Image (tube, rainbow, N blue to C red):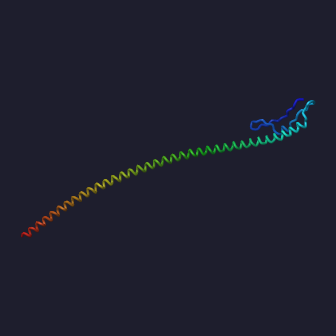
Amino acid sequence: MPVLYNINLCTQGGDIMLTPLDIENKRFGKQMMNGYNVNEVDDFLDELTLEYGKLYKENAELKEKREELDNDVDKYKNIENTLQSTLVMAQKTADEITAVAKQQADQIIKDAEFSAKNSVEELNTQITLKQKELEELKKQFDVYKAKMESLLISQLELLKDIKED
């Protein structure tokens, strides 16, 4: 008699796998001559069921763990994308702030240069006015001095005339 297969197939993640129950329930047809020892086959199936059950359970746990890790990777990729976007925005903001600060600094320098130029022009005007005042005072002093000399000379002349008389 041929070997009979009564196997239920289970799919997990696209893989076709026998379940430990499939192995446990597996029955072979008996042959009259030169057949398998039923006890040996049953013992082997029991051992195979235990070992396969462990592997089946481990495989399911690993697939579950892989799915969790895949979810974690997706979560961290989202976080990474968010961080990259944040860094790009922060860099853009920093560049804009730097540009504005440079413009303000340039404007402050221009204003200071303009103010300094005006101050220099005003000081030059004041210096020119003071120089004119000084020249005017010198002229007045020279006129005063000349008048005093003239007065003194006339007074000396008077004194001489009085002395001669």
Query: Residue at the location (49% across, 47% down)?
Result: 98
User: In the picture, residue 17 is in which quadrant?
Assistant: top right
Give the mark count. 0
Left or right side of 151 for 50:
right
* Along the viewing direction, whichever of 27 and 143 lies nearer the viewer: 27
Residue 14 x, y percent position in the rendering: 75, 36
Q: In this picture, is 6 found above or below 87?
A: above
Q: Please tell me in which quadrant of the rendered image residue 70 appears.
A: top right
Residue 23 relative to residue 97: left or right: right
- The residue closer to the viewer here, 78 or 57, is 57
Could you tell me which residue is drawn at 78 percent across and 35 percent down? Answer: 16
Q: Quadrant of residue 27?
A: top right
Residue 18 vs residue 129: left or right? right
Position in image of residue 164 (x %, y %): 7, 69
Quarter of the picture containing the C terminus is: bottom left
Name the spot of residue 154 as percent of width and height, x first.
12, 65
Residue at 33 percent across and 54 percent down: it is 123
Left or right for 1, reference 11: right
Residue 141, percent across and down? 21, 61
In this view, which residue lies farthest toward the left?
165
Frontmost residue, 59 versus 47: 47
Q: Residue furthest right?
A: 32
Viewport quadrant of the N terminus = top right
